[in-house]
């Protein structure tokens, strides 16, 4: 009996520690309130966090599901298809067509999923125009 109580208390203690360790998790509200600058856009600082929150969930652009054959979980994955991201040329990048809902691309994200803000769309476009660097 004493062993069971200690086990239960240990599990509660571990759960409490783990739940407080998640305070640095980036949420959709955090991403939507963050401003991507008009120039010098960083993939790791500005673009990947948007993909992580808006695109990389179950059934979409994660490494398991690869919706449309595309994962957006890392720089390598994002830039692996030269037609999706054309470094230095957002006008011919399928990614920009899709997030702007232009002809020639699928509308992303689809209705019912968290929409990108105009600042996020502009940031992705600028990052591509600036050469789609791994910065």
Image: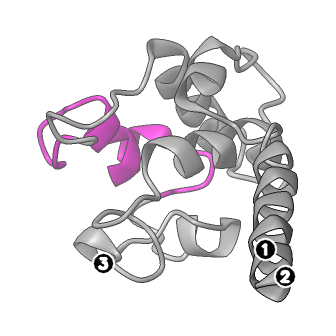
Pointer 1 with pointer 2, Cβ within 8 A: yes
Query: Which of disc 3 and disc 2 is earlier in sequence?
Result: 2
Residue placed under numbered mark 3 in the picture: 69
Residue placed under numbered mark 1 in the picture: 5
How far apart marks 2 and 3 lie (CA) works out to: 54 Å
* Dominant secondary structure, magenta: loop
Tell me which segment is drawn in magenta: 85-107
Residue 8 higher or lower than 57, as above or below: below
Rendering quarter of residue 2: bottom right
Residue 17 painted magenta = no
Say which of 101 and 86 sits in front.
101
Q: Can residue 89 be seen in this view?
A: no
Measured as percent of width and height from the top left, residue 113 is found at 26, 37
**Could you tell whether 120 is left or right of 37 in the image?**
left
Q: Is mark 3 on a helix, strand or loop?
A: helix
The residue lying at 46 percent from left, 74 percent from top is 81
Residue 20 higher or lower than 58, as above or below: above
């Amino acid at each position: 009996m004493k062993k069971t109580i200690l086990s239960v208390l240990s599990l509660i203690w571990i759960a409490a520690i783990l739940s407080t360790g998640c305070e640095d998790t980036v949420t959709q509200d955090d991403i939507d309130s963050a401003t991507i600058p008009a120039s010098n856009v960083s993939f790791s600082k500005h673009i990947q966090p948007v993909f992580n929150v808006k695109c990389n969930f179950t059934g979409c652009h994660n490494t398991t599901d690869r919706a449309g054959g595309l994962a957006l979980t890392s720089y390598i994955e994002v830039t692996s298809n030269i037609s999706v991201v054309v470094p230095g040329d957002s006008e011919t990048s399928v990614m920009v067509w899709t997030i702007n809902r232009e002809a020639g691309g699928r509308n992303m994200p689809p209705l019912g999923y968290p929409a990108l803000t105009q600042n996020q769309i502009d940031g992705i476009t600028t990052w591509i125009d600036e050469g789609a660097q791994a910065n």
